[in-house]
Image (spheres, rainbow, N blue to C red):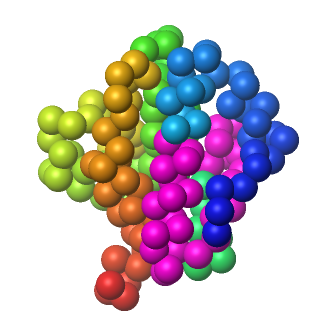
Amino acid sequence: MSESPLPREVRRAFEAFPPPVRRRLLDVRKLIFATARADDDVGPLTETLKWGEPSYLTERSGSGSTIRLGRVKDSETHAAVLFNCKTTLVETFRERFPDQFEYRQNRALLLPVAGTLAKQPLAVCLSLALTYHLDRRGRR
């Protein structure tokens, strides 16, 4: 499962982000696909829009919880990786990486758009989201 070309509506959503936010979120998109490829239980991703934001779903396998990419309202210095607020994902991220990311309630981790992307800890968070239902069902 390689990173696929951007679907037209998703490309338009990325184009609407300020350039620094767009660049950071495109980096996160690459990491989402790479993380999914590294785990056979995840399977192919569906890339679509939810609430007007690029979203990544494990529709075929049902292994994970949706990941959305967005921006922090009124900020061009941070991008947001959003998760279903009814999950324990952000709480788990906070426990594992208390100082690595800035968090927004129980729904998002915030990434500075400048500087180096913390790929390794972010990949762990993305993997936890992409396998959330497997872990909850005890299939891991």
To which quarter of the image does residue 119 belong? top left
In the image, 79 versus 65, the foreground residue is 79
Quarter of the image with the N terminus is bottom right
Q: What x and y, as percent, mark residue 38?
A: 46, 69
- Relative to 53, does residue 138 appear above or below in the rendering? below
- Relative to 98, does residue 13 appear above or below in the rendering? above
* Residue appearing at x 52%, y 74% in the figure: 42
Q: Is residue 96 magenta?
A: no
- Relative to 21, does residue 82 appear above or below in the rendering? below
Q: What x and y, as percent, mark residue 134?
A: 41, 79
- Residue 65 appears in view: no
* Residue appearing at x 71%, y 45% in the figure: 49
Quarter of the image with the C terminus is bottom left
In the image, 93 versus 25, the foreground residue is 25
Q: Is residue 22 left or right of residue 7?
A: left
- Residue 22 appears in view: yes
To which quarter of the image does residue 66 belong? bottom right
To which quarter of the image does residue 6 belong? top right
- Relative to 121, does residue 80 appear above or below in the rendering? above
What's the magenta region? 28-55
Q: Is residue 51 magenta?
A: yes
Q: What x and y, as percent, mark residue 86?
A: 40, 56
* Residue appearing at x 76%, y 36% in the figure: 11
* Residue appearing at x 54%, y 34% in the figure: 25
Q: Is residue 51 left or right of residue 70?
A: right
Q: Furthest-bottom residue in view? A: 139
Counting every numbered tag in the picture gives: 0
Q: What x and y, as percent, mark residue 97?
A: 18, 46
Q: Is residue 69 left or right of residue 79?
A: right
